[in-house]
Image (tube, grey):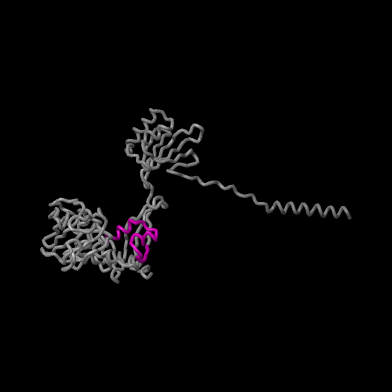
Amino acid sequence: MKKIHLLIILLFSLFSCKQSDSVSIIPDEKIPAEIEQFGFKTSDFNILNDTIRKGDTFGSIIENQNLGDKKVYDIIEKARDSFNVRTVRIGKAFTFLRSKDRYKKLEVVVYQPDKSSYYVIDLRDSVLVYKKIRPLTFKQRTIAGKLDGSLSEALSKQGVDAALANKLTKVYAWSIDFFKLQKGDKFGVTFTERFIDDTIYDGVDSLKAAFFEYRGKLIYAFPFAQNQNSGKLDYYDDQGKALKNFFLKAPLKFVNITSHYTQNRFHPVQHIWKAHKGTDYAAPTGTPIMTTAAGIVEQTGYTAGNGNFVKVKHDKTYSTQYLHMSKILVRKGQRVSQGAIIGKVGSTGLATGPHVCYRFWKNGVQVDALKLKLPNSQPMDKKNLPRFMTQMKPLKRELDSVANL
């Protein structure tokens, strides 16, 4: 009986061992992925990353790598063929790829003058120098929001580069008075952003479409090239009407109107009632003043009342004048383009604080620029309207999908 009992125990043990062996799992060894930088396997090198400091030159940073004077000279001479070694700038990155042995011999130098490109100086055989451009990708997105302060602030809350605000103000400079936008006004924008190597953000690239709520109306903007060969873009609303006018709305950006055109105003300096035939825009001293339309500088100078001033003749009908400048930046007879900086805000002449008084003439008579209906730029050719509508409609649908916030 004891023998039978021992036999059963032995068989059970053998069965358990076999069962255990059959379900054992040997984990797979994970092979680490090779990491590349600048086209080189990082595991092959001892890597040193650094930046150009004050007093550094291209020669001085490689001299410290025990290459010898002759080798350093040869490297510099070879590198000159690809880039100006004298233009290495403070704060720009460079990388040394060195041997992994105890000598840490310099084998590759990489200099990065900007985010989108870098130079490689390969020393492993003969000296080889070449430039690499990182691939750019473009991603499109549409955002919408409501104003609760400046346009820049509203865009910043949505993580958008401030450069987009500048693009929008330029596009709408002829159709929207940004001084009169109100809290709660809506906007929507479709735009593209650049990414280096698909991951490094490189800013706003282009504006594809936009709308602004202005005085209760949505004003759209769509870029379109009437002449496809030239590729020159102008902006049009959803009906194909040009947004660009002959005149900008104002000679400054993002400032306050402190005094309007009027036939009877109490002068803050002279303390008498008199006509004020201009519009005052307050801004800090030194703020750039733009000419609101292209033309020829008719007058520059100084008077006791106007202070430093510039007057621009735009055509046979229109002229504008800009008063109280701290500095005049143009000369009489000079041709200026629309938006050109002609001076800087000041408080010269009869002025209680820094501002520009903007005056407007039509047929030799001073008029209120804010109430004047001004001519538009060249309208869209009717033959181009179908092509514009085809391009515009999907962009408008995208904007309209975010318009109801």
Of 149 and 146, nearer the camera is 149
Q: Position of residue 243 (x, y in %)?
A: 24, 64
Q: Is 279 on the left-hand or right-hand side of 134? A: left
Q: For the view shown, which residue lies furthest in the right direction?
A: 1
The residue under the point 24% across, 57% down is: 232
Q: Is residue 168 above or below residue 72?
A: below
Q: Position of residue 91 (x, y in %)?
A: 38, 43
User: Over which residues does the magenta segment extend?
Assistant: 142-171
Of 152 and 348, nearer the camera is 348
Q: Is 109 on the left-hand or right-hand side of 180? A: right
Q: Quadrant of residue 383?
A: bottom left
Q: Is 399 on the left-hand or right-hand side of 367? A: right
Q: Position of residue 78 (x, y in %)?
A: 35, 34
Of 172 and 22, nearer the camera is 172
Q: Quadrant of residue 181?
A: bottom left
The N terminus sits in image quarter: bottom right
The residue under the point 59% across, 47% down is: 29
The residue under the point 21% across, 62% down is: 280
Taking the magenta stretch, the answer to whether it contains residue 209 is no
Q: Position of residue 289 (x, y in %)?
A: 22, 56
The C terminus sits in image quarter: bottom left
Taking the magenta stretch, the answer to whether it contains residue 147 is yes
Q: Quadrant of residue 268?
A: bottom left
Of 127 and 242, nearer the camera is 242
Q: For the view shown, which residue lies furthest in the front direction?
A: 271
